[in-house]
Image: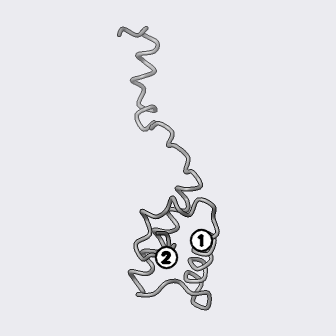
Amino acid sequence: MEYPKELEELFNDPLLADVKPASKPLTADDRLAEKLLCINEYIKRTGHRPLPGGNLEEKKLCRSLEAILNHPSVSSLKNYDEFNLLNIE
């Protein structure tokens, strides 16, 4: 397709070389899956699930796990649950 000269100049402008398409925003389920993956990594690193009496990171992950367990779409996270934290059959 042949573009007018003005458009060709715009397309070839070096300022536009770094322009990338906008990324799709994360959904609520995507954010929950990311949190569950962080919890999985914590368990791999420490050997236990996050507890409310631990350090700041552990407390935050424990609260995240509680929020995930109480979320209505918890069943959609079954594929990310490496340690059977969600107790989904």
Total marks in image: 2
Q: Which residue is the extreme one toward the left?
A: 1
Work out whether 13 lies above or below 46.
Answer: above
Between residue 72 and residue 68, name the one nearer to us. 72
Q: Where is mark 2, residue-wise?
A: 85
Q: Which residue is the extreme one toward the bottom?
A: 53
Between residue 20 and residue 12, name the one nearer to us. 20
Q: Is residue 44 left or right of residue 55?
A: left
Work out whether 68 lies above or below 56.
Answer: above
Mark seen at residue 77 = none
Number of residues whose C-alpha sits closer than 10 Å to that of mark 1, classed few (under 14), some (14–19) or many (20 or more) = some
Marks 1 and 2 close (CB-CB < 8 Å): yes
Give residue 12's quadrant in the image: top left
| Residue drawn at the location 53% of the way across and 83% of the way down | 50
Q: Where is mark 1, residue-wise?
A: 69
| Residue drawn at the location 46% of the way across and 21% of the way down | 10
For the N terminus, give its image quadrant: top left
| Percent of width and height locating residue 14 | 41, 31
User: Which badge, 1 or 2, is on the more N-terminal residue?
Assistant: 1
Under mark 2, the amino acid is Leu
Under mark 1, the amino acid is Leu
Classify mark 2: helix, strand or loop.
loop
| Percent of width and height locating residue 33 | 50, 62
**What's the colour scheme?**
one colour
Between residue 37 and residue 25, name the one nearer to us. 37
| Residue drawn at the location 52% of the way across and 67% of the way down | 35
Between the residue at mark 1 and the residue at mark 2, the CA separation in whole angstroms equals 9 Å
| Percent of width and height locating residue 54 | 57, 90
Classify mark 1: helix, strand or loop.
helix
Q: Which residue is the extreme one toward the front?
A: 89
| Percent of width and height locating residue 69 | 59, 71
Q: Is residue 9 left or right of residue 24?
A: left
